[in-house]
Image: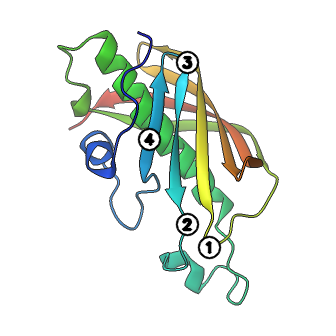
Amino acid sequence: MSEVQKEYDIVEIMKYIPHRFPFLLVDRVTEINENGGKGYKNVTMNEWFFQGHFPGRPIYPGVLIVEGMAQCAGFIALKILEAKNPESANKENLMYFMMIDKTKFRKMVLPGDKLEYEISIIKLSGKIAKFQGYARVNGELCAEAEMTAMIDERK
C-alpha cells in the first residue's frame, strides 16, 4: 500500500469515527500512507471551551490537542486496515484510548490557528495500535504524544 487517498473531508471522517460536535476535533485528513498520515483542525474563537479556558486569553486546551491527534490517528489506522483488507468492515470498528505516554506541550494554540496533526504508526496489528503524534502550527511543534489504542467492533 503506497497511499490510500490524498484527502478526506469531514463527511468521510464521520463515517469512521463516532465523535460529533462539539467533540469532533479533526476537520480534514490530508494524507495517508503505510507509515501514518496527516490531518488538521481549524481552531476558531467560536469553540465552546474558550468561554471558560482562560477568558480574555483564549488558549486551546492541551488535552484536546492530544484528543485531536488520537482521532486523526484512529481514522488513519482504520483506513489503512481497510486498504489492506477491503472486504473487512472497518467502518464498523472503533479505536479506544488505552494509554498516552511521553506527552509534551511546547507552544500555545490560539484561535485562528490551523492545528496540523502528523501521525506515525509505531504498531498496527491485531487489536492494538500504537502511534506517535505531533501537533504543529505554522510548522512549529506545539505538542507531541505517544498513544496506544485498542481496536474493537462497534456495538
What residue did someone put label 4 on? Answer: 29
Q: Position of residue 154 (x, y in %)?
A: 24, 36
> How far is mark 1 from mark 3, CA to CA?
30 Å
Crowd band around label 1 with a 10 angstrom C-alpha radius: few (<14), some (14–19), many (20+): some
Q: Which mark is first along the chain, 2 or 3?
A: 3
**Image point (57%, 25%), residue name:** 130
> Horizontal and vertical percent for residue 59?
69, 73
Q: Tell me the distance, in whole angstroms, between the alpha carbons under discs 2 and 1.
A: 5 Å
User: Residue at label 2?
Assistant: 43
Q: Name the amino acid type tagged 2.
A: Val
Q: Earlier in the sequence, mark 4 or mark 3?
A: 4
Q: CA distance from mark 3 to mark 2?
A: 26 Å
Q: Work out whether residue 3 or residue 124 is closer to the camera in this orientation and state it.
A: 3
Residue 39 drawn above or below residue 5: below
Kind of residue at disc 1: Pro
Q: Name the disc covering residue 111, or none.
A: 1
Give how far apart the Cα atoms at labels 2 and 4 are.
Answer: 15 Å
Secondary structure category for the residue under label 1: loop
Query: Given contact means CB atoms under 8 Å apart, are the residues at marks 1 and 3 in contact?
Result: no
Q: Residue at x 35, y 65 (%)?
A: 21
Q: Earlier in the sequence, mark 2 or mark 4?
A: 4
Q: Is residue 22 above or below residue 20?
A: below
SS type, badge 4: strand
